[in-house]
């Protein structure tokens, strides 16, 4: 960029106009954020499930022994013939973040649950599988990093092991989440895990299948993202 | 059918024609009732609602109070994360920036998520001149674009159409479409037409709901997943935002997100909340290789000059003010002739377009206060409309920066009438003789006085003035034994 780059000129003009207004910097307010909060694990789980169900997601509660069987059943139910998976997490990408990344934790069970159908493992540049991903895949399976009880929301932290499009392009998204990963609300999650210290490329909060009410306020599912969201909640405590 | 308008200068004519369109009025009435109900049930506890709005207003005010620092911090952190930041004074500069990124990549197609700022700079139009196709991918925007039309609402762009009209639009523009009023089928039609576009597009463009200075993160709120498509699938992602959208801390985001979804559509949460902090990193397998952020001023720094007007910039674009505005509900979004319609449009458009063009808009309010009552960040819209009305009529006072187009609505007749009134009202002699002669001349009062008598009877001065009546009463009292 040269010194006469219009963007640089624009920047200094804009900033100097804003500074000319001599704004008085205000301190951080001391106000309460009235948001749903409860430390009761049972209540959290109920609220989490109710929120997701109200938003048209299917939630299945199981013990960790039943993962493979459940995945198999869901895939049959959804008539999925081609499924895409992440790769087992090598944890290098998560070492930087202050998060006990559990990606890949249930990878063996996922492989077992999908052994009878066509599996594509997402371990190459998206360009190499883009057309297949768009046209042939019925479902993508991911882990979830956390759950937000307040709104019934899954938190995904895509990375090399589980790329972003895995939960976006296939018409069905199957997400695994552990009971212990559910927290009260979004603010609490951010604060607890000190997200502000380091943000990854992408974090996405998901609260149901893709939807729109753009035509005459009538709710329709499967606008551009997955039409189905199946959440497998693993009772680990 | 296109409802598009010629611009805010023609507000009166456009409003008149909208009022004469029963279908349009029915579509808006239905939609606004629905959105009002949804918002009401989302905020069922008034105490909680008040606390949340106080907090949101305070967050937005604090962030604006540090705007220049926060913009620099945002740029520094984005740059550190690998996001390239560009600054644009106006629509032309913003379009130049986007065009040069597109040309550098030899791009032929841009697929767009919802972005009102891109409407503001008329991006689609400008890119078309360069042979670059911009395709709207939000369902509502897609429908509106097929019509060659513009959005009529900032959250629900195709709100002015019912399902039959959408079906007609598809039938007109899409091959192999079987007319239907089944909304699921209509949406699936849109979905399948856009899928290949996401796959093929060279560039994805999006707006920004919150830009976090602390971490250099761009947050996007949506339900459809097209926003995620645009920001994930193409090799290049360009985000464009007004400079006011920056927030200081990551912790500012949850309350604002909460209040935004509940005010806009009455949802506790949207399907997706997307936080983007960098382009694809080494080793990652998807996501854009380049992310650009364009920061647009376009009149916002004018609104910033004055502490009261600065509140305009607190807006989080939820649309609640338009959903509750009796004027918007009746005339619809296109009548305003601006990118942002309704109450928020009435207070932001004068800064973007100048008061010459928007002086009628600021009068298009009953000042009933509904907009201010629902605004989640407590923008005092009615007060600001009154301010803008004054500025439209009067020249600036010394040492205050004039607004673009200030005093362009001044009328010599009006100002003489006002001066005359001031003179009469402050001098008893003139006042008494004027009221006395009015009471004598009341028979000559015309039956029609301009628009005033369109739906009112003409006012008739009383036979006696108030002073005369009081005198008579006093006299009667003292006459009594
Ligand atoms: S002015 Fe207030 S109510 Fe209107 S869109 Fe902005 S934030 Fe929402």
Image (tube, coloured by chain):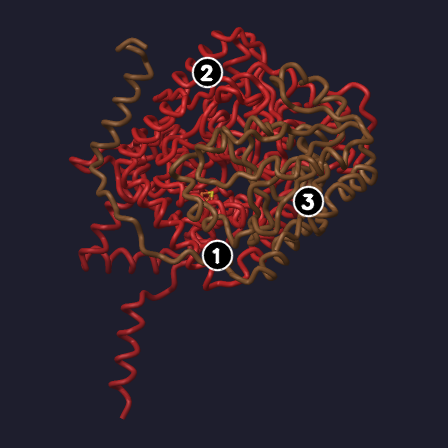
Chain colours: A brown, B red
* Left or right of residue B349, residue B171 in this image: right
- Where on the image, by quarter, is ligand 1? top left
Query: Vertical placement of A75 versus B473: above or below?
Result: above
Label pair 2/1, CB-CB below 8 angstroms: no
Between the residue at mark 2 and the residue at mark 1, the CA separation in whole angstroms equals 40 Å
Q: Residue at horizontal 49%, vertical 19%?
A: B282
Q: Is mark 1 on a helix, strand or loop?
A: loop
Residue B15 percent coordinates (x, y): 54, 37
The residue where tag 3 is placed is A231
Q: Residue at horizontal 41%, vertical 19%?
A: B94
Residue B444 percent coordinates (x, y): 41, 52
Q: Which mark is residue B98?
A: 2
Residue B445 percent coordinates (x, y): 42, 52
Residue at the extreme bottom of the image, as rendered: B481
Q: Which of B379 and A222 is in front in this view?
A: A222
Residue B425: image quadrant is bottom left
Label pair 2/3, CB-CB below 8 angstroms: no
The residue where tag 1 is placed is A35
Q: Which mark is residue A175?
A: none
Do marks 2 and 1 share a chain? no
Chain ID of residue with mark 1: A
The C terminus of chain B appears in which quarter of the rendering?
bottom left
* Left or right of residue B292, residue B421 in this image: left
Between the residue at mark 1 and the residue at mark 3, the CA separation in whole angstroms equals 24 Å
Chain ID of residue with mark 3: A
Q: Which of marks 1 and 3 is in front?
A: 3
Residue B163 visible (yes or no):
yes
* Left or right of residue B152, residue B315 in this image: left
* Left or right of residue B164, residue B201 in this image: left
Query: Vertical placement of B155 versus A12: above or below?
Result: below
Residue B136: image quadrant is top right
Q: Is mark 2 on a helix, strand or loop?
A: helix
């Amino acid at each position: 960029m040269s010194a006469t780059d219009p963007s640089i000129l624009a920047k200094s003009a804009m900033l100097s106009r804003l500074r000319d207004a001599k704004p008085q910097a205000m301190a951080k307010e001391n106000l309460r954020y009235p948001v749903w909060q409860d430390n009761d694990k049972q209540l959290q789980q109920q609220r989490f499930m109710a929120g997701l169900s109200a938003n048209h997601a299917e939630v299945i509660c199981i013990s960790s022994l039943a993962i493979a069987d459940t995945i198999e059943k869901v895939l049959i139910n959804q008539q999925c013939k081609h499924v895409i998976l992440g790769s087992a997490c090598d944890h290098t990408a998560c070492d930087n973040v202050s998060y006990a990344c559990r990606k890949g934790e249930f990878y063996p069970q996922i492989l077992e649950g999908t052994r009878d159908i066509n599996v594509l493992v997402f371990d190459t540049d998206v360009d190499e599988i883009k057309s297949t991903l768009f046209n042939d895949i019925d479902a993508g399976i991911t882990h979830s990093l956390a759950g937000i009880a307040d709104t019934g929301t899954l938190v995904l932290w895509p990375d090399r092991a589980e790329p972003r499009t895995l939960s976006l392009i296939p018409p069905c998204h199957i997400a695994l989440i552990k009971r212990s990963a559910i927290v009260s609300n979004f603010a609490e999650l951010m604060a607890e895990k000190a997200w502000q210290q380091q943000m990854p490329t992408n974090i996405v909060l998901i609260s149901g299948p893709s939807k729109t009410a753009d035509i005459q306020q009538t709710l329709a599912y499967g606008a551009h993202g997955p039409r189905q969201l199946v959440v497998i909640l693993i009772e680990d405590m | 059918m296109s409802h598009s308008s010629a611009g805010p200068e023609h507000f009166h004519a456009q409003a008149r024609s909208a009022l004469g369109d029963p279908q349009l009025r029915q579509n808006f009435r239905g939609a606004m009732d629905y959105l009002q109900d949804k918002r009401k049930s989302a905020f069922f506890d008034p105490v909680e609602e008040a606390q949340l709005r106080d907090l949101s207003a305070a967050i937005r005010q604090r962030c604006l109070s540090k705007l220049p620092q926060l913009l620099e911090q945002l740029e520094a952190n984005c740059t550190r994360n690998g996001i390239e930041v560009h600054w644009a004074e106006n629509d032309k500069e913003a379009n130049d920036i986007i065009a040069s990124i597109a040309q550098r990549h030899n791009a032929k197609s841009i697929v767009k998520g919802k972005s009102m700022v891109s409407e503001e700079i008329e991006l689609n139009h400008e890119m078309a001149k360069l042979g670059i196709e911009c395709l709207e991918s939000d369902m509502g925007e897609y429908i509106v674009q097929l019509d060659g039309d513009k959005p009529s609402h900032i959250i629900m762009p195709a709100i002015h159409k019912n399902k039959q009209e959408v079906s007609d639009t598809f039938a007109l523009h899409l091959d192999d479409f079987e007319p239907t009023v089944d909304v699921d089928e209509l949406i699936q039609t849109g979905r399948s037409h856009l899928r290949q576009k996401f796959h093929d597009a060279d560039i994805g463009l999006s707006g920004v709901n919150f830009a976090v200075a602390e971490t250099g993160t761009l947050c996007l709120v949506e339900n459809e997943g097209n926003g995620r498509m645009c920001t994930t699938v193409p090799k290049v992602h360009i985000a464009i935002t007004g400079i006011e959208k920056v927030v200081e801390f990551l912790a500012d985001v949850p309350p604002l997100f909460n209040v935004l979804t509940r005010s806009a559509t009455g949802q506790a949460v949207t399907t997706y909340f997307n936080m983007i902090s960098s382009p694809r990193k080494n080793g990652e397998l998807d996501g854009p290789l380049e992310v650009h952020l364009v920061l647009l001023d376009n009149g916002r720094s004018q609104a910033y000059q004055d502490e009261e007007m600065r509140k305009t910039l607190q807006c989080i674009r939820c649309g609640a003010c338009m959903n509750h505005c009796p004027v918007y509900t009746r005339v619809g979004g296109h009548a305003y002739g601006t990118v942002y319609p309704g109450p928020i449009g009435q207070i932001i458009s004068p800064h973007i377009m100048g008061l010459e063009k928007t002086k009628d808009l600021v009068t298009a309010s009953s000042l009933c206060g509904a907009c201010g009552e629902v605004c989640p960040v407590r923008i005092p819209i009615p007060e600001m409309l009154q301010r803008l009305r004054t500025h439209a009529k009067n020249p600036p006072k010394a040492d205050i920066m004039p607004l673009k187009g200030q005093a362009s609505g001044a009328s010599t007749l009006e100002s003489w009438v006002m001066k005359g009134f001031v003179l009469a009202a402050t001098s008893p002699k003139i006042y008494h003789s004027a009221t006395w002669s009015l009471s004598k001349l009341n028979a000559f009062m015309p039956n029609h006085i301009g628009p005033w008598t369109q739906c009112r009877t003409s006012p008739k001065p009383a036979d006696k003035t108030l002073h005369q009546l009081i005198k008579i009463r006093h006299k009667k009292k003292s006459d009594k034994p």
